[in-house]
Amino acid sequence: PEVINGRTHKATVVDLSPWVEYEFRVVASNSVGIGEPSRPSALLKTKAAVPVVAPTNISGGGGSRSELVITWEPVSEELQNGEGFGYVVMFRPLGSASWTKAVVASVESSKYVYRNESITPLSPFEVKVGVYNNEGEGTLSSISIVYSGEDEPQMAPAGASALSVSAAAVEVSWLPIPWNRLTGRVLGYEVRGW
């Protein structure tokens, strides 16, 4: 902090964080050196303010059919700037003009799930997450693209064939299912025999 003239007995401390408890000490100094600090002042909490830090790491995806799962990294307590803190989640189908808005009132929340039967599997959505407290709505994150949940594959693999390689083993092969919105991301195959 700036050194204050010895005849001054009052100072304004600036650039403090909103809604944070502080205590203060005063130290006298002269050309010889710095003396002992005063006893700490009583704790004083600064006034609340609208939050200015948006959540980070906006992502999501997965979930079940007809679901849009949105996740984010929660804002730490020292950046919430007041009581009544929560999140504002906004999303729209990619290319749409109007946003859907939801409020998540829990401070610890890091996830929101939107369920709607009209959502087709693996549909891209534009998503942004903001913050609010009792003082008002704060900053929104930048837009992220999040895909709705997948459905089970609607196509069977084609071209299945089997080749006997020994008295106790058969090699089975097939054509892979191409990735598309109907098949989703194929994570594996199950081979059945009878």
Image (cartoon, rainbow, N blue to C red):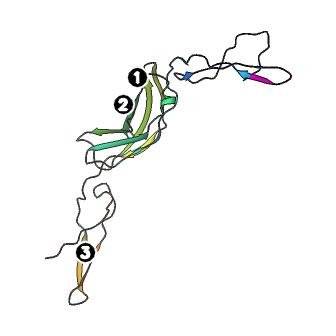
| Residue holding disc 3 | 159
Residue under the image location 24 percent in, 68 percent down: 190
Q: Nearer the viewer, residue 106 or 152?
A: 106
Indicate the position of residue 27 as horizontal and vertical percent values: 73, 20
Q: Mark on residue 84? A: 1
| Magenta segment includes 20 | no
Q: Nearer the viewer, residue 93 or 58?
A: 58
In this view of the protein, can residue 94 be seen by the observer?
Answer: no
For numbered disc 1, what is the local secondary structure?
loop
In the picture, measured across the screen, residue 85 lies left or right of residue 39, that is left
| Magenta segment includes 32 | yes
For numbered disc 3, what is the local secondary structure?
strand
In this view of the protein, can residue 65 be seen by the observer?
Answer: yes
- CA gap, disc 3 to disc 2? 51 Å
Tell me the kind of residue under disc 2. Ser
| Residue holding disc 2 | 106
Instruction: State the image quarter where residue 146 is shown.
Output: top left
Tell me the kind of residue under disc 3. Gly
* Magenta range: 31-35
The quadrant in which the N terminus is found is top right
